[in-house]
């Protein structure tokens, strides 16, 4: 079980479903959400500020990230996160791309980001979580 997961998606129904499936699967103790890449960057900026103030906080260990979102999509988020040293503050964060399209070019592109550990098709299911947790033990 994870202590904290972040789900990033612009669709409120997808976020609700993601939270419900994670809760029913006892996959994580806490589930935070963001509605696009920009919100996710702000989320991590707030965590960085808390870390710099030596606050004792629980960091997300896993992030489910949609690719196609308004304002800032998943690719833009991954670029900013990679290029601006966020990995120094969050070295253990792993990302699972959760997308409605499975374009082989997107799957290949996702492999260029060291923090991305998988590429799954929406919607998230209990079986995906069970499979994932069994493969990471």
Image (cartoon, grey):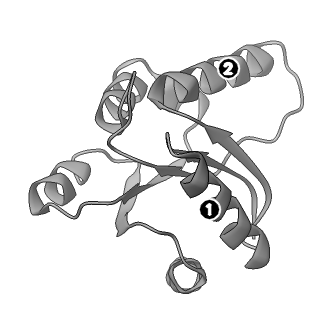
93, above or below 76, in the image = below
Does residue 62 appear anywhere in the picture? no
Q: Which mark is residue 48?
A: 2
Does residue 45 appear anywhere in the picture? yes
Secondary structure of the residue carrying tag 1 is helix
Q: Residue at x 21, y 46 (%)?
A: 112
53, above or below 6, in the image = above
Q: Nearer the viewer, residue 9 or 48?
A: 9
Q: Residue 119: x and y, percent?
A: 33, 63
Quadrant where the C terminus lies? Answer: bottom right
Q: Residue at x 49, y 39 (%)?
A: 10
Q: Nearer the viewer, residue 113 or 129?
A: 129
Q: Residue 18: x and y, percent?
A: 62, 62
Q: Residue 30: x and y, percent?
A: 80, 54
Task: Point out the tag, 2 or 1, that comes first from the N-terminus.
Answer: 1
Estimate the spatial distance between the alpha carbons at disc 2 and disc 1, rounded to whole Å: 25 Å
Secondary structure of the residue carrying tag 2 is helix
Q: Which mark is residue 18?
A: 1
């Amino acid at each position: 079980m994870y202590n904290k997961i972040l789900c990033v998606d612009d669709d409120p129904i997808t976020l609700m479903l993601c939270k419900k499936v994670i809760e029913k699967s006892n996959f994580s103790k806490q589930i935070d959400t963001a509605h696009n890449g920009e919100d996710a960057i702000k989320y991590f900026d707030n965590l960085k500020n808390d870390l710099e103030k030596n606050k004792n906080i629980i960091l997300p260990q896993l992030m489910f990230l949609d690719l196609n979102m308004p304002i800032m999509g998943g690719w833009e988020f991954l670029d900013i996160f990679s290029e601006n040293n966020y990995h120094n503050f969050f070295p253990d964060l792993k990302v699972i791309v959760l997308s409605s399209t499975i374009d082989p070019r997107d799957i290949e592109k996702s492999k260029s980001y060291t923090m991305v550990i998988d590429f799954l098709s929406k919607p998230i299911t209990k079986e995906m979580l069970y499979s994932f947790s069994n493969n990471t033990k």
